Image: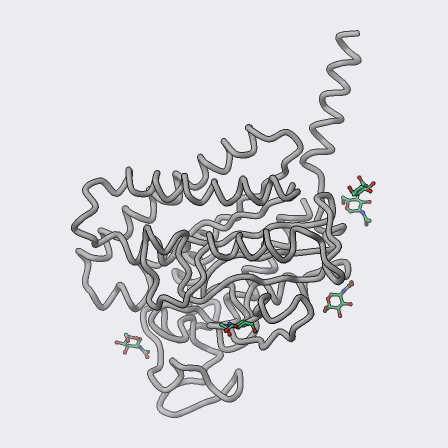
Amino acid sequence: MRLAFFVWSIVDLAAVVSAKWNTTKFLFAFGDSYTTDGFNISAGVDSPVPGFTSSNGPNWVQFLGGTYNITDTKVFNLASGGATIDAALVAPFQPTVLSIVDQVEQFHQILAPKPSGAQWSGNNSLFAIWIGINDVGNSFGRSDIKSQTQFHATLMKRLFGQVDTLYQDGARQFLFLTVPPTNRAPLILVQGPKVAASITSALADYNQQLVANIKAFEAKHRGVITTIFDTRPIFNTLLDMSATFGFVNQTGFCDAYQNGTPDTNTEIPPCAPVSSYFWLNSLHPLFTVHNILAKAIATKLSL
Ligand SMILES: *[C@@H]1O[C@H](CO)[C@@H](O)[C@H](O)[C@H]1NC(C)=O
Ligand SMILES: *[C@@H]1O[C@H](CO)[C@@H](O)[C@H](O)[C@H]1NC(C)=O
Ligand SMILES: *[C@@H]1O[C@H](CO)[C@@H](O)[C@H](O)[C@H]1NC(C)=O
Ligand SMILES: *[C@@H]1O[C@H](CO)[C@@H](O)[C@H](O)[C@H]1NC(C)=O
Ligand SMILES: *[C@@H]1O[C@H](CO)[C@@H](O)[C@H](O)[C@H]1NC(C)=O
């Protein structure tokens, strides 16, 4: 009996951690400018995807759902450029930005009832959440925040309250991305080493709390599968070895390209072609970086 129980436990565990990417029919994405493609669910479940990204080409969700998909995965991207977890905790750059709280509310209202065109179920859907870039970026220097650690704990409570809502709506499979090393973005570098050091420690604390909260969420809910994708090694490797990977500049961008270019390989001398940069502008990496990220994510989801 004991042995049978033990074997059953292993089988059960194997089922819980097994590959699911090849059976993912629906991908729901939540996040900020790194994730949005301009899709507006309020305009209709079947409204067109404008493809407005921050990467001068496809972004990681588009590569994941449309290039590294191994089945016909339908993507619903609810992300909003500039998003924070909750606008009341960290104000976004514009009041019209939809926070994670807003995005989850949209999911709850429009997609949780499983309308025609989005008849998903918990066992064939992946919920991808990449948030925190703006939460950390817009809060690490705030003088009214006495303890960064406590503030991040408040953010986590709010974020995982939203994740709980998704769970109650039937979500079972989750993908979380850590906040990338934005301390290496031109936006921060130009502010000098003190500011860079300050955001570096804030990012480390945020990501550490994020991982701990994901594990606690998974432990609390039986049948939940979570994948944590750490974006930091990819960003750091590409930046550390930028010449090897063919990026012409690891610290800066070309002014002429920062608002996007007509083509993915536009060249405006004296800059190299836009596709050879890592950073399109002060905060956003190019589609080439998103492509590599998506490939690694697809692999991790298939292990
Ligand atoms: C998905 O991948 C798993 C693990 O590699 C495999 O066991 C399973 O048969 C695959 N399912 C489909 C539908 O291809
Ligand atoms: C999304 O669509 C709704 C309904 O058509 C509209 O009111 C809203 O302004 C749109 N949002 C954006 C950001 O375009
Ligand atoms: C992957 O997605 C693309 C774009 O939606 C689709 O054309 C393609 O058929 C999908 N691949 C598979 C293997 O289903
Ligand atoms: C997936 O969930 C649906 C709806 O709850 C259910 O009908 C189906 O049997 C499940 N499939 C698997 C493989 O568990
Ligand atoms: C890289 O960007 C930095 C910061 O903008 C700039 O100072 C430097 O000249 C650039 N290097 C090259 C090779 O373009």
Residue 277 place in picture, x, y as percent: 43, 75
- Tell which of 297 and 97 is nearer to you: 97
Viewport quadrant of the C terminus: top right
Q: How many marks?
A: 0
Give how far across and how far down residue 218 sits, in percent. 56, 33
Residue nearer the viewer, 178 or 267: 178
Q: Is residue 69 left or right of residue 192?
A: right
Residue 5 image-quadrant placement: top right
Q: Is residue 27 above or below residue 219?
A: below
Residue pictured at 69% horizontal, 34% vertical: 16
Give the residue drawn at x 29%, y 58%. 138
User: What residue is rendered at 32% in x and 58% in y?
Assistant: 91
Residue 214 horizontal side relative to residue 142, left or right: right
Q: Outermost residue, top direction?
A: 1
Picture quadrant where residue 11 is located = top right
Is 65 situated left or right of 166 in this image? right
Q: Quadrant of the N terminus?
A: top right
Q: Position of residue 220 (x, y in %)?
A: 55, 28
Q: How is the image coloured?
A: one colour
Viewed as shown, does residue 72 lie left or right of 76?
right
Q: Nearer the viewer, residue 34 or 293?
A: 34
Would you place residue 292 above or below residue 47 in this image? above
Residue 200, percent from left and from top: 29, 51
Quarter of the figure with residue 208? top left
